[in-house]
Amino acid sequence: MGTHKEPFMLRANVKQGVLLKELNKRTQDHLQQCLPYRNMIHHMSVFPCDHLNELPFLPVQVFKMLDLYSVPKESIVKTLTSSGTTGQQVSKIFLDKDTSVKQTRALASIMTSLLGKKRVPMIIIDSKSVIKNRQAFSARGAGIVGFSNFGRKHFYLLDEEMNIDWDGLEAFLREHKGEQIFLFGFTFIVWQYFLQACQKYNRSIDLSKGVLVHGGGWKKLKEEAVSNEQFKEALFNQFGLKRVHNYYGMVEQVGSIFIECEYGHFHTPDFADIIVRDSLTYEALPVGKQGLLQVVSTLPKSYPGHSLLTEDVGVLLGEDTCSCGRLGKFFQIEGRLPKAEVRGCSDTVAYDQKGARG
């Protein structure tokens, strides 16, 4: 675990200055190049800002209503869409090559800190059908493609009907016996279509050398009263899986994921941060106070997604002091603002098993 400090190396006093300079520049660029953005935020704050807490933000919902981009339309190479249940509006995120490359590199720095630099055999706990359209990805498809860069010999565990390919799984595990295996999937899919299926058919599989990274789709598990601790315990009991890391992230700021450390805390990397705000006054809150999460990232250049107010409720736990050794703010998620729309990457599967909207 000695490599894991790489994207978590800036102490608070240095990081705040670096981020403020970059995010002021990002805001300035988007103000000049994206008219709808300028119309929405020009009255929100004095600019440039003297402190990160003063940075103007957009609510994530705005990407469901408007097409926002800050580059010429012909330079957009990829459009990502958020999840949405049937009939729901989805967010559209427009990436040019530069932003896409930056996001890929940022994700790589975070994942390398967790897995090491050597790519290992990978089980993708999903169906290959999700990634059919490479130009217009759902959040689920984008997640699979993004994380698959950190594994090799990719094995898709589920068929189009979301059933486990038992023969393929046995052959894969036989071939890679004794090796570290990287597993990736969305939380609800891991729970229902992998763990519960193995319990149902009484299949105990040795994944004691595995590392599972999962995220999104907690809403359905909360309805089943499954906590993060119970999720981890069930995976350990069934598979001997000890290294399980949840992550918090969203298609509106893809690349800036907040990974869960060994102590169960989400961590902000050097190029991103969070601010917890009072849900009524939007005042920035101190450590220990619950509020709405604002996420900031230096990565979004092709669209104004560098400072977003989410619908997620969280608590800042501290900065630079987590026992895992990573520097930066660390926090926990408490849930979603009541009555907010379902937006999780894999919640959709609970509504529409055939849907490729992730």
Image (cartoon, grey):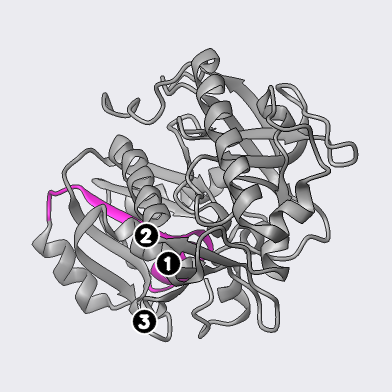
**Image quarter (top left, top right, bottom left or bottom right) of the N terminus:** top left
Please give the residue where the numbered disc 3 appears in the rendered image: 132
Whether residue 224 can be seen here: no
Say the numbered circle drawn on residue 278: none
Q: Is residue 155 above or below residue 177?
A: below
Counting from the top left corner in percent of width and height, residue 64 is at 69, 68
**Distance Cα–Cα, label 2 vs label 3:** 20 Å
Dot 1 or dot 3, earlier in sequence: 1
Q: Quadrant of residue 133?
A: bottom left
> Looking at the picture, how far across and down is residue 187, in whole percent?
50, 59
Q: Does the magenta-highlighted stretch encompass residue 194?
A: yes
Q: Does dot 1 land on a helix, a strand or a loop?
A: helix
Q: Residue at x 63, y 25 (%)?
A: 317
Q: Which comes before the other along the chain, label 1 or label 2?
A: 1
The residue tagged 1 is 75
Q: Which span of residues is magenta-colored?
A: 177-201
Residue 247, above or below 318? below
Q: Secondary structure at mark 3?
A: loop
